[in-house]
Amino acid sequence: MGRLFAISDIHGCFKPFYELIVNTIKLTKSDQLILLGDYIDRGDQSKEVIDFIIDLTEEEFNVTPLAGNHEVMLTDSYYDPDVLPLWLMNSGMSTLESFGIQDIREIDNRYLEFFTTLDYYKIIGNMVFVHAGFDDFAINPFADKQSMIWECRLSYQNPKLSGKTIIHGHRPKTISYVKKLIGEKSKVIPIDTGCIYEKQIGYGNLSALEVNSMTLFSVPN
């Protein structure tokens, strides 16, 4: 059986993403890789990150990219100009510059299709992969897209999540904190280790969790 990896919150940091995939975990076509969203904004190589993800899928690596709040803000801005200020306030301009455009409606259809076809969650066995988390009080938490990209919780009581381990990103944590939760066999494990925040002590790393062995691989930005 191949390995199962999850990576979250790349945020335009192409170089550590490439290093993590190619030289650290050495992804093979027998592995499965779940990407938990927020590929764009903040960093200055959002286009390179998206191109690399698309290249991996076209080369038939088993990659499943999920939506993060930043991808949803981009697509919302494309279809509704009233949403644009929220995206720009969240570093959308860095993505426009990376793609060499001034207006999101100038984006190539290839990329628009990528952003608009992202799933919001993935279930593999008893593992649930999502960008942020779930509405714990919803009758069907898997129907609430807004919560899946914005809401993180430390634990869940919803019967539909019973017995599941939730792997998510969205809120950056230190590597030591993530490893602590892994060691405690927590049912909720955050894997965003703040790649873009390299100037903040304890952060500035991009991490991949190998889910079968619960091993965390990290590279600094």
Image (cartoon, rainbow, N blue to C red):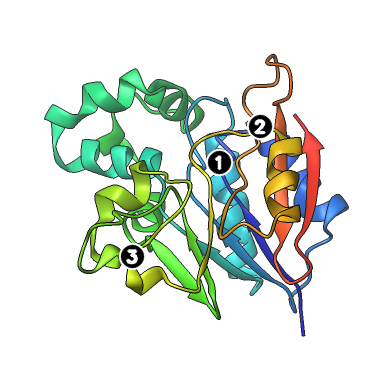
**Earlier residue among tags 1 and 3:** 1
Quote the CA–CA distance across marks 2 and 3.
Answer: 31 Å
The residue singled out by tag 3 in the image is 158
Residue 9 marker = 1
Image coords of residue 49 (percent x, y): 59, 43
Q: Is residue 76 above or below residue 148?
A: above
Where 54 sits versus 98, above or below? Answer: below
Q: Secondary structure at mark 1?
A: loop
Question: Which type of secondary structure does the marked residue at label 3 adopt?
Answer: loop
The answer to whether marks 2 and 3 mark residues whose Cβ atoms lie closer than 8 Å is no
Which quadrant of the rendered structure holds the C terminus? top right
- Asked if the residue at tag 1 contacts the one at tag 2, i.e. Cβ–Cβ closer than 8 Å, the answer is yes
Judge whether residue 108 can be spotted in this image: no
Circle 3: residue type: Asn
Q: Is residue 176 above or below residue 126?
A: above
- Relative placement, left or right, of 80 versus 37 is left
The residue identified by callout 2 is 195
Q: Residues within 10 Å of mark 2 (few under 14, many from 20)?
A: many
Q: Nearer the viewer, residue 83 or 58?
A: 83
The Cα–Cα distance between marks 2 and 1, rounded to whole angstroms, is 7 Å
User: Please, which residue is most extreme toward the bottom here?
Assistant: 1
